[in-house]
Amino acid sequence: MAELRVRSVLVTGANRGIGLGLVRQFLQMPNPPEWVFAACRDPKGQRAQELQNLASRHPNLVITPLDVTDPTSIKAAAARVEEQLGGSGLNLLINNAAIAKMSTLDGETLENMIQVYTTNTAGPLLLGQAFLPLLKKAAQGSPGSELSCSKAAIVNMSSSGGSIEEVYVWDQGQVVSYRCSKAALNMLTKCQSLGYREHGVLCIALHPGWVKTDMGGPRSQIVRKLLTVEESVQGMLKVLSSLSEKDTGTFLSWEGKVVPW
């Protein structure tokens, strides 16, 4: 596998599932990042125990308080990361935090839509805005003009469930608010790719596959192949290591295949 080399990375929703898997994989790299920022809502809580254990063994892991639905929390996290980086930029922002509400089209509610959109779509928007100065700084400090994840990138964790063309496994799980939020996240990714290209920031939407996690697991019986966290994360990091200028603004799977919008 081609190795993704970054000096610094921030992962949201890093206390469990895919987020925790990403953090583990970054720390295990032959040339790990100088700084791995693992962001979650309650760094000292029981649900972050595995992160705490990792941090005790890896001095380059910084657990960062972050509620992606709270603009004040986002700004505070950006300030903490900037201080820790000490004048250098942030190479990679992975917007992984997400929620899903199991509901049908007839049973969907305004409350669900607002809560899911706030986390899955508005959160990545606000994080992109807050961390853009650090991403720009990383891009400016990297050699060459070509876009890449080693230079500066925003990775938005999307889902084939948000594909308007496929509407994957509709009959088995409607989850309307989740689907709509991910379709909107895909549009946000495209907008970010257009708006941030001039700053040297690559932007991509990634489908991690159907993964055996707290979120993906309950639907395992309707999916042909359920991935482990390790399989998904290793595949995604291989994809990220290969991205270039031509890939910004696209929607790819953990295997590097184009996912239809």
Image: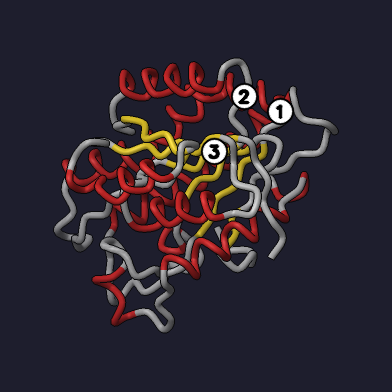
- Return the mark for residue 9: 3
Quarter holding residue 220: bottom left
In x, y percent, where is residue 42? 23, 36
Secondary element type, mark 1: helix
Q: Which mark is residue 89?
A: 2
The amino acid pointed to by label 2 is Gly
Q: Which quadrant of the view contains residue 28?
A: bottom right
Q: Residues within 10 Å of mark 3 (few under 14, many from 20)?
A: many
Left or right, residue 71 beside residue 3: left
Residue under the point 36% across and 51% down:
180
Which residue, given by chain and number where applicable, does mark 1 sit on?
139
SS of the residue under disc 3? strand
Across and down, in percent, residue 77 comes to 39, 24
Of marks 1 and 2, the one in the foreground: 2
| Upstream in sequence: badge 3 or badge 1 | 3
Upstream in sequence: badge 1 or badge 2: 2
Quadrant (top left/top right/bottom left/bottom right) for the C terminus: bottom right
Taking 175 as reference, is 190 left or right?
right
Regarding residue 34, the answer to whether it shows in the image is: yes
Three-letter amino acid code at the position of disc 3: Val
Residue 98 visible in the shown view: no
Residue drawn 46% across the image and 44% down it:
185
Marks 3/2: CA–CA distance: 10 Å
Q: Seen in the image, is 105 located left or right of residue 184?
A: left
Is the image coloured rainbow, by chain, by secondary structure, or in one colour?
Answer: secondary structure
| Vertical arrangement, residue 109 with respect to residue 10, above or below | below
> CA gap, disc 3 to disc 1?
13 Å
